[in-house]
Image: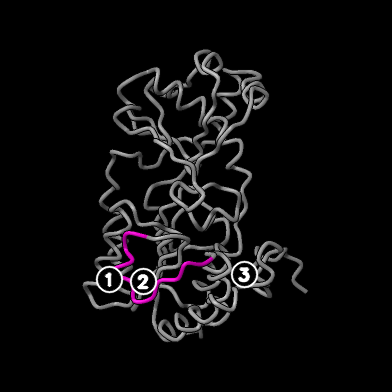
């Protein structure tokens, strides 16, 4: 007998965790049946965004209940040591929260679809690596990954877990002091908002141990371009598919929207499951405003294997 927790296994699974045991609502079920009928027999490429990870306790940037945020741009990060100090202090707190997140039923559902041969690939705008934790293999981490840092000088990469230990040594007691100072608001890129200027000003930033250069999380900042090889691989996944399924993305930034436009231009069905409007709604064959994880879980069980 499979002893895995619901939502964490790839075989003998029940992919509705406790938070979504009821499954889709009757209203959503009608739309999901239409999606199932449209996608049956087609190889899918799945594009996911932050709305998928909210059920794992990771906040969304642009969901209906998201607080307005102004993420630090690449230019701000590289151009001012004070900005880097503020960013790494906040990231140190955010990492301590985000690294404990687990995949939810939606992540598991996508992995199950891949295992059953339904996918040509998975493109994710998320940096949380929860798709890989759930078992997905053929993944393009379009915006990079939060569990790795890169030196902007020598381009060496390091584990974010290792950096956390270094930052803790450089800043003993910082995490607890920050949490004790008041509410800490998390963001999906492991950033956190902390309203304590004194704590931030005392934070010691780690440098690259190899060359003394500037370390940066290995994901795409606002104002940075997505690496060309990731874009090309993502287009190839879309071209190899019969339909595009968007889950939990508002498609606000062009990095994801371009694949929706490309699929629509090629005459491929586009399905969007998201809470709230998206920039791709005009290109959607079917759009459903519904819970992402429970919708994906239902589709993973209902779509016939190819």
What secondary structure is marked by label 3? loop
* Quadrant occupied by the N terminus: bottom right
N-terminal of the pair, mark 2 or mark 3, is 3
Would you say residue 101 sits in the magenta stretch? Answer: no
Marks 3, 1: nearer the viewer: 1
Q: State the residue at coordinates (40%, 17%).
A: 82
N-terminal of the pair, mark 3 or mark 1, is 3
- Residue 124, compared with residue 270, is above or below; it is above
Q: Position of residue 44 (x, y in %)?
A: 40, 74
Q: Is residue 105 left or right of residue 73?
A: right
Q: Position of residue 65 (x, y in %)?
A: 51, 49
Q: What residue did someone put label 3 on?
A: 10
Q: Which residues are magenta?
A: 278-290
Q: Which mark is residue 263?
A: 1
Please say if the residues under marks 3 and 1 sit with CB atoms less than 8 Å apart: no
Q: CA distance from mark 3 to mark 1?
A: 29 Å
Colour option used: one colour
- Residue 270, compared with residue 153, is above or below; it is below
Q: Position of residue 192 (x, y in %)?
A: 52, 33
Q: Is residue 119 left or right of residue 255?
A: right
Please say if the residues under marks 1 and 2 sit with CB atoms less than 8 Å apart: yes
Q: CA distance from mark 2 to mark 3?
A: 23 Å
Front one among 294 and 167:
294
Q: State the residue at coordinates (65%, 66%).
A: 20
Q: CA distance from mark 1 to mark 2?
A: 7 Å
What secondary structure is marked by label 1? helix
The answer to which image quadrant residue 45 occupies is bottom left
Front one among 276 and 227:
276
Q: Which mark is residue 244?
A: 2
């Amino acid at each position: 007998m499979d002893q895995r927790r619901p939502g964490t296994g790839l075989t003998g699974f029940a992919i509705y965790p406790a938070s979504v045991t009821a499954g889709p609502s009757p209203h959503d079920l009608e739309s999901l049946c239409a999606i199932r009928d449209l996608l049956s027999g087609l190889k899918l490429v799945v594009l996911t965004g932050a709305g998928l990870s909210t059920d794992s306790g990771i906040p969304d940037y642009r969901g209906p209940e998201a607080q307005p945020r102004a993420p630090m741009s690449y230019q701000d990060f590289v151009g001012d040591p004070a900005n880097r100090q503020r960013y790494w202090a906040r990231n140190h707190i955010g990492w301590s929260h985000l690294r404990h997140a687990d995949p939810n039923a939606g992540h598991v559902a996508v992995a199950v679809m891949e295992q059953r041969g339904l996918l040509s690939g998975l493109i994710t705008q998320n940096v949380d690596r929860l798709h890989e934790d759930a078992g997905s293999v053929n993944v393009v981490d379009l915006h990079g990954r939060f569990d790795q840092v890169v030196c902007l000088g020598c381009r060496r990469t390091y584990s974010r877990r290792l950096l956390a230990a270094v930052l803790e040594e450089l800043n003993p007691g910082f995490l607890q002091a920050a949490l004790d100072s008041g509410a800490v608001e998390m963001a999906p890129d492991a950033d956190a908002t902390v309203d304590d200027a004194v704590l931030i000003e005392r934070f010691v930033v780690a440098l690259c141990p190899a060359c003394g250069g500037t370390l940066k999380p290995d994901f795409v900042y606002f104002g940075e371009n997505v690496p060309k090889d990731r874009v090309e691989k993502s287009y190839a996944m879309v071209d190899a598919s019969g339909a595009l399924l968007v889950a939990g993305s508002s498609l606000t930034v062009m990095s994801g929207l371009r694949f929706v436009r490309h699929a629509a231009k090629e005459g491929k069905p586009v399905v969007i499951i998201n809470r709230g409007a998206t920039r791709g709604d005009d290109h959607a064959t079917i759009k459903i405003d519904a819970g992402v994880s429970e919708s994906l879980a239902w589709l993973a069980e209902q779509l016939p294997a190819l």
